[in-house]
């Protein structure tokens, strides 16, 4: 197959294009119902980030699709795993597992965080924020799915499931839906769980990385319950960027990393600014989420005693 033939095959992945008008309609409806959850300049940035991310993703997506085809051809399972219902069910779990680790490491590795932080830069929680996709993360995203075609799943099937996951995740970006039935909250990502994920409060930082299933967070120790009666989620970053300039929103963390690298004298410290969690410093206070949470827990224990 030529590169053009690969692109033509990839062009069959149209699920998100069909969903986009529904997304826009949902934003309009939510805005009419709850204008207080929106700021026009903020929503403009969100829509711009959606366009930026689509542009940046194009080449990595084509490269990933071609790589997935080659890996799929190598799989001894490709003639067994077709598009039966059970194959879609297995792929659902494989895709969601991959998404969890992709999303979690976007929060725990600073160079990945620089590509994801865009999505968290809004101080509002609404359907518009769902479209404020991380721009830089589009470059490394597909590495987390590279193992799946080796299991015999064809690339278009994988990309379709990735699209289904993104469509599901759109609706969890809202304050209009309170907690759902307990069984649903236990198994699935919900608006309540995702409000926690977007919160900058210490008790909520770097929790609830779920795509569709919240069970991964429960299994791997990154789950936090929304407790509005104790502490209402405050959206945005721990230090907000205070800008609506799209290019700055998309690149500000890369600039911050570069400044930190220049400050460090040792090469080991320079590298740590790339792979350590956001908040790590070679010469200052440790402000990583886990460190801050432990400090808060100790203070709570002291006060309770």
Image: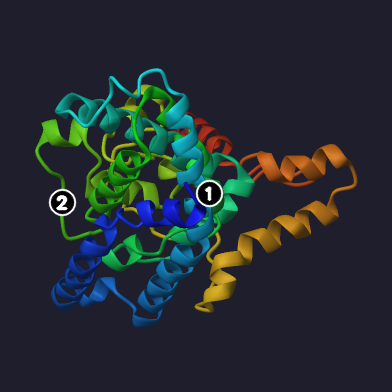
Q: How many neighbours does mark 2 have within 10 angstroms: few (below 14), some (14-19), or many (20 or more)? A: few
Picture coordinates of residue 6, whole percent (x, y): 44, 51
Real-space Cα separation, disc 1 to disc 2, in angstroms:
40 Å
How many numbered dots are placed on residues in this image? Answer: 2
Picture coordinates of residue 100, whole percent (x, y): 40, 36
In-front residue for pair 250/232: 250
Judged left or right of residue 239, residue 51 is: left
Q: Among all residues in the image, which is located at the extreme bottom?
A: 40
| Residue under numbered circle 2 | 178
Question: Which label is found at residue 103?
Answer: none
Instruction: Tell me what residue is drawn at x 40 percent, y 81 percent.
Output: 41
Judged left or right of residue 153, residue 60 is: right
Q: Is residue 149 above or below residue 161?
A: above
Residue 225 in view, yes or no: yes
Helix, strand or loop at mark 2? loop
| Residue under numbered circle 1 | 63
Judged left or right of residue 70, residue 130 is: left
Picture coordinates of residue 51, whole percent (x, y): 43, 70
Residue 231 in view, yes or no: no
Picture coordinates of residue 106, whole percent (x, y): 52, 44
Choose the circle earlier in sequence order: 1 or 2.
1
Closer to the observer: label 1 or label 2? 1
Judged left or right of residue 181, residue 171 is: right
Helix, strand or loop at mark 1? helix
Q: Among all residues in the image, which is located at the extreme right?
A: 265
Q: Is residue 142 above or below residue 217?
A: below
Q: How many neighbours does mark 1 have within 10 angstroms: few (below 14), some (14-19), or many (20 or more)? A: some
Instruction: Tell me what residue is drawn at x 35 percent, y 24 percent.
Output: 78
Instruction: Tell me what residue is drawn at x 26 percent, y 34 percent.
Output: 213
Instruction: Tell me what residue is drawn at x 21 percent, y 32 percent.
Output: 83
Q: Among all residues in the image, which is located at the extreme left?
A: 181
């Amino acid at each position: 197959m030529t590169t053009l033939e690969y692109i033509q095959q990839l062009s069959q992945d149209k699920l998100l294009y069909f969903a986009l008008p529904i997304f826009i309609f949902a934003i309009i409806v939510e805005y009419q119902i709850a204008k207080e959850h929106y700021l026009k300049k903020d929503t403009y940035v969100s829509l711009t980030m959606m366009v930026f991310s689509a542009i940046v993703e194009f080449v990595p997506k084509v490269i990933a699709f071609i790589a997935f085809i080659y890996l799929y051809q190598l799989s001894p399972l490709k003639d067994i795993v077709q598009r039966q219902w059970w194959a879609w069910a297995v792929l659902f779990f494989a895709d969601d597992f991959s998404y969890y680790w992709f999303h979690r490491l976007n929060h725990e590795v600073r160079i990945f965080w620089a590509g994801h932080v865009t999505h968290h830069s809004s101080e509002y929680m609404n359907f518009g924020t769902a479209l404020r996709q991380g721009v830089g993360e589009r470059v490394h995203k597909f590495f987390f799915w590279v193992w799946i075609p080796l299991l015999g799943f064809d690339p278009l099937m994988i990309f379709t499931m990735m699209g289904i996951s993104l469509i599901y995740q759109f609706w969890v970006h809202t304050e209009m839906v309170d907690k759902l039935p307990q069984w649903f909250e236990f198994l699935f990502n919900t608006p309540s769980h995702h409000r926690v994920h977007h919160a900058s409060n210490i008790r909520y930082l770097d929790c609830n990385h779920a795509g569709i299933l919240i069970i991964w967070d429960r299994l791997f120790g990154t789950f936090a319950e929304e407790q509005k009666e104790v502490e209402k989620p405050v959206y945005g970053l721990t230090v907000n960027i205070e800008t609506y300039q799209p290019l700055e929103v998309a690149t500000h963390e890369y600039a911050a990393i570069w400044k930190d690298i220049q400050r460090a004298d040792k090469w080991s410290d320079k590298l740590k600014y790339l792979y350590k969690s956001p908040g790590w410093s070679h010469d200052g206070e440790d402000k990583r989420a886990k460190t801050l949470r432990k400090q808060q827990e100790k203070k709570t224990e002291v006060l309770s005693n």
